[in-house]
Image (cartoon, rainbow, N blue to C red):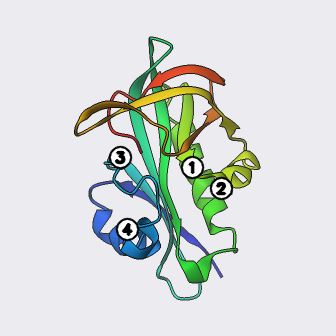
């Protein structure tokens, strides 16, 4: 049994990822999310992991690259977002495999200084067990109405060259 992992262009792979993301983040699920009305960035790349038993898409991780401002200094970062696993495929380690592939891809970009993701409290332990650290600071981002303080989810960072733990981050665009 083999697991197929593809890392594809974000826009070109949207058609393949969309059914999984719409199933995981259905209208019924989204109605209870504090971040349901947030406008999100589109992934630059996507990690897509197929289930070995049926070959269907089991897991998705979006990868984002952007120059942000950290404490007023421009820094190139990698981002992780849209981590989603098909309900019948959960608990098999697929999200860990896809996340590892995404972090490896981000680390391969020599300009990236650190990676950042945003998550809900029930996922804190998952990300911390995989080397992510809470960022205790202020995060701002763009939304259609203008710049907002992003508090819908907690920021976590993965150290690459820099190890930010506090301060101010301006995402200089939509969140991921």
Q: 32 or 8: nearer the eye?
A: 32
Mark 1, residue position: 119
Q: Quadrant of the image for the N terminus?
A: bottom right
Q: Earlier in the sequence, mark 1 or mark 3?
A: 3
Q: Earlier in the sequence, mark 4 or mark 3?
A: 4
Q: Is residue 151 among the parts visible in the rendering? A: yes
* Dot 3 alpha-carbon crowd within 10 angstroms: few under 14, some 14 to 19, many 20 or more: some
Residue drawn 56% across the image and 79% down it: 87
Question: Are circles 1 and 4 on residues that touch, CB within 8 Å?
Answer: no
* Dot 1 alpha-carbon crowd within 10 angstroms: few under 14, some 14 to 19, many 20 or more: some
In this picture, residue 42 sits left or right of residue 111: left
Question: Are circles 1 and 2 on residues that touch, CB within 8 Å?
Answer: yes
* Dot 4 alpha-carbon crowd within 10 angstroms: few under 14, some 14 to 19, many 20 or more: many
Mark 3, residue position: 44
Residue drawn 32% across the image and 62% down it: 13
Res. 4 image quadrant: bottom right
In this picture, residue 82 sits left or right of residue 17: right
Q: Nearer the viewer, mark 1 or mark 3?
A: 1
Mark 2, residue position: 123
Residue drawn 51% across the image and 20% down it: 168
Q: 136 or 22: nearer the eye?
A: 136
């Amino acid at each position: 049994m083999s697991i197929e992992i593809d890392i594809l262009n974000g826009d070109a792979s949207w058609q393949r990822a969309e059914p999984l993301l719409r199933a995981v983040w259905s209208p019924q699920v989204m109605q209870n999310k504090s971040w349901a009305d947030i406008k999100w960035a589109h992934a630059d790349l996507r990690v897509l992991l197929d289930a070995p038993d049926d070959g269907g898409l089991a897991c998705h991780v979006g990868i984002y690259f952007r120059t942000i401002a950290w404490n007023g200094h421009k820094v190139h970062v990698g981002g992780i977002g849209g981590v989603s696993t098909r309900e019948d495929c959960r608990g098999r380690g697929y999200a860990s495999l896809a996340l590892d592939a995404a972090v490896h891809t981000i680390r391969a970009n020599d300009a990236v200084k650190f990676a950042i993701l945003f998550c809900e409290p029930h996922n804190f332990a998952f990300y911390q067990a995989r080397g992510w650290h809470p960022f205790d600071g202020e995060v701002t981002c763009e939304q259609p109405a203008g710049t907002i303080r992003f508090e819908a989810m907690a920021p976590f960072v993965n150290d690459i060259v820099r190890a930010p733990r506090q301060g101010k981050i301006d995402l200089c665009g939509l969140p991921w």
